[in-house]
Amino acid sequence: MNDRLFVHVPYSFLLQNLELVLTRRVNPEVFFSGDMLDSLIPEELAAIAATLTGSGLSTTIHAPFVDLNPGSAERLIREATLLRLAQVIDAAAILKPRVVVFHPGYDRWRYGENQETWLRYSIEAWEEILPRAAEIGFTVAVENIFEEEPSTLLALFEALPQLRHCFDVGHWNLFKKVGMAEWFAVVGGSIAEAHIHDNRGQRDDHAPVGEGDIDFALFFRLMKEYAPQAAWTIEAHSKEDLDRSLVNIEKFL
């Protein structure tokens, strides 16, 4: 597999199917839920990390995200979020990923015009995380989720230049109010990773590449122009969808 191409793999799956990952030569983007982090055995993760490294495979990490928000106006939510972020960074210290992807937590329907509150708390949270990430040696990237345009992400990157972007092309297609080229013109230079899956703009299908209505020729052309060294992660939700994506993506590699 291309050394820049990763595949979404929950840690619980990796624990049970490490041999399959090794056989398929898949670079895993390891997803940790909160429950997975609570039950994580460091020695077990260290053994997996050594096996992957010894087999020449690289990793990235997808951090937990459900109900978490580093920029929440609610103190208890921020505290819970920082706890999970600290746990995933402990895991990263063992796994030594290339990138760790986090959800930013912004939703304009929730915050309305009160973006500054979210931005202030969010910056404070990342300021706690980024120094340790630098010590360990991985890139912190925040993914677009409900963002209709990239202004709130741009504000984060301007405040914290070491923070990078994970561009999720499927989420962009669901919520966009600006074109892909316009999005890249604003924050394309900050992209460290891209999440790759398809849909028809109605629901988050995580369909194989080429089976929705996303213009992947344009996507890969923009990635080559703005982020030629970025990691690519296929976010398939079944083995069959993954296999179809791997076949369909070959013409872009």
Image (cartoon, grey):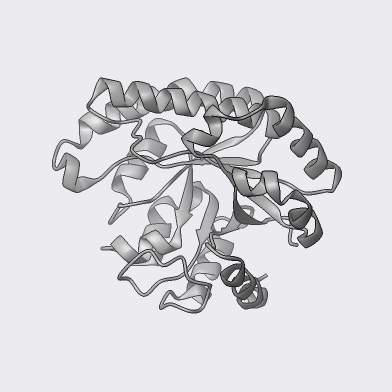
Horizontally, residue 95 falls left or right of residue 104, namely right
**Is residue 71 positioned above or below 184 on the image?**
above
Q: How many marks?
A: 0
Foreground of the two, 23 or 229 = 23
Q: Which residue is found at the position 51% from the left and 65% from the top? A: 222
Image quadrant holding the N terminus, namely bottom right
Horizontally, residue 122 falls left or right of residue 142, namely left
Q: Which residue is found at the position 36% from the left and 35% from the top? A: 68
Image quadrant holding the C terminus, namely bottom right
Q: Position of residue 57 (x, y in %)?
A: 77, 49
Q: Position of residue 175 (x, y in %)?
A: 29, 61
Q: Position of residue 221 (x, y in %)?
A: 54, 70
Horizontally, residue 239 falls left or right of residue 106, namely right
**Is residue 244 positioned above or below 102 on the image?**
below
Horizontally, residue 49 falls left or right of residue 248, namely right
**Is residue 146 positioned above or below 214 on the image?**
above
Figure quadrant of residue 238: bottom right
Q: Position of residue 203 (x, y in %)?
A: 33, 67
Foreground of the two, 74 or 36 = 36
Determine the residue located farthest toward the left in the rendered image: 113
Foreground of the two, 94 or 21 = 21
Q: Which residue is found at the position 23% from the left and 25% from the top? A: 74
Q: Which residue is found at the position 70% from the left and 33% from the top? A: 45
